[in-house]
């Protein structure tokens, strides 16, 4: 009997060690995206809500992010499948309820070595639904980004995100450029500050700060705020969310 007990324990040991080595990593909060992909066969749900006020042009727009949900599934050691659904409600001259469903992937190209950054590629296609306040026809959108992460030290890391975005309300593409500095204050608490930009028909620039708190091995809570550097007193966003690895 003792022999079979020992054999059973050693059979479970490799999977137990593997589970302990799987570090939790979420793509929220923040506009820039990290390079990590989901472990093979694991599913993660990242969801949240938020509020945006824009007084930079009349009339004032109030936009509620009713829900943003991202499902990430590890397909291979280097790749994940992504499915995202965003729902917004805008109040200005009139009310509008709209959103988009996006499907895509993130592929890890290089795991990083010392100060050499980890590198991943992210791409998706977004299909819109509903109408904005302006009532204009919305188009299929998407994005194609290159992601970089550098571990500066045990607690500090620097992420960069550069790519092209095709907005569902505009046929022209914009260039996205963002940089995020992260600090792991404790084993559970993470802080970050980032600056990100869109270059296209004009230039928009944002500053975002926030924090995340991990509860157990598979659950994370987060809160963040964005301030427009083009109109800091008039345009801001607040958001909160949760990430759950199943």
Image: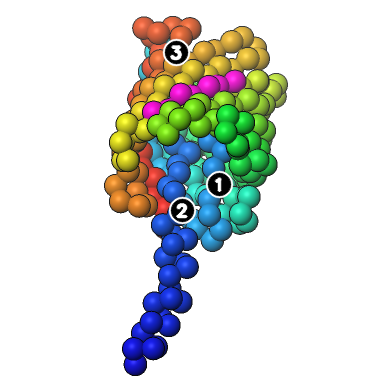
User: Residue at left 37%, top 33%?
Assistant: 184
**Label 1 CA crowd tier, 10 Å (few <14, some 14–19, many 20+):** many
Q: Look at the numbered disc 2 and give the secondary structure of its residue.
A: loop
| Marks 3 & 1, CB-CB < 8 Å contact | no
User: Is 222 rendered above or below residue 174?
Assistant: below
Q: Quadrant of the C terminus?
A: bottom left
Q: Quadrant of residue 242?
A: top left
Q: Position of residue 88 (x, y in %)?
A: 44, 33
Label 3 to label 1: alpha-carbon separation: 30 Å
Q: Relative to the observer, which residue lies in front, 165 or 171? A: 165
User: Residue at left 54%, top 12%?
Assistant: 204
Q: Earlier in the sequence, mark 2 or mark 3?
A: 2
Q: Which residue is mark 1?
A: 37
Q: Is residue 205 magenta?
A: no
- Left or right placement of residue 130 versus residue 175 in this view: left
Q: Which residue is mark 2?
A: 22
Q: Quadrant of the N terminus?
A: bottom left
Label 1 to label 2: alpha-carbon separation: 11 Å
**Residues in magenta?**
177-183
User: Residue at left 45%, top 54%?
Assistant: 21
User: Is 187 rendered above or below residue 65?
Assistant: below
Q: Earlier in the sequence, mark 3 or mark 1?
A: 1
Viewer-nearest of labels 2 and 3?
2
User: Residue at left 42%, top 47%?
Assistant: 24
Label 2 to label 3: alpha-carbon separation: 36 Å
């Amino acid at each position: 009997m003792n022999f079979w007990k020992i054999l059973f324990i050693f059979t479970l040991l490799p999977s137990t060690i593997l589970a302990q080595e799987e570090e939790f990593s979420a793509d929220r909060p923040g506009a820039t995206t990290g390079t990590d992909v989901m472990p093979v066969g694991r599913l993660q749900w990242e969801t949240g809500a938020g509020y945006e006020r824009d007084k930079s042009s009349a009339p004032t727009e109030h936009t509620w992010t009713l829900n943003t949900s991202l499902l990430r599934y590890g397909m291979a050691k280097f790749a994940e499948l992504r499915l995202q659904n965003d729902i917004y409600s805008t109040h200005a001259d009139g009310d509008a309820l709209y959103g988009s469903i996006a499907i895509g992937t993130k592929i890890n190209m290089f795991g990083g070595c010392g100060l050499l950054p980890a590198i991943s590629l992210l791409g998706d296609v977004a299909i819109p639904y509903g109408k904005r306040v302006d009532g204009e026809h919305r188009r299929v959108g998407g994005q194609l980004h290159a992601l970089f992460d550098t571990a500066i030290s045990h607690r500090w890391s620097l992420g960069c995100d550069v790519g092209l975005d095709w907005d569902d309300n505009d046929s022209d593409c914009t260039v996205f450029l963002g940089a995020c500095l992260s600090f792991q204050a404790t084993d559970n608490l993470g802080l970050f500050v980032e600056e990100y930009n869109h270059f296209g028909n004009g230039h928009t620039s944002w500053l975002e700060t926030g924090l995340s708190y991990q509860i157990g091995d598979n659950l994370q809570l987060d809160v963040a705020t964005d301030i427009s550097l083009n109109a800091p007193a008039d345009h801001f966003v607040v958001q909160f969310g949760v990430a759950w690895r199943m």
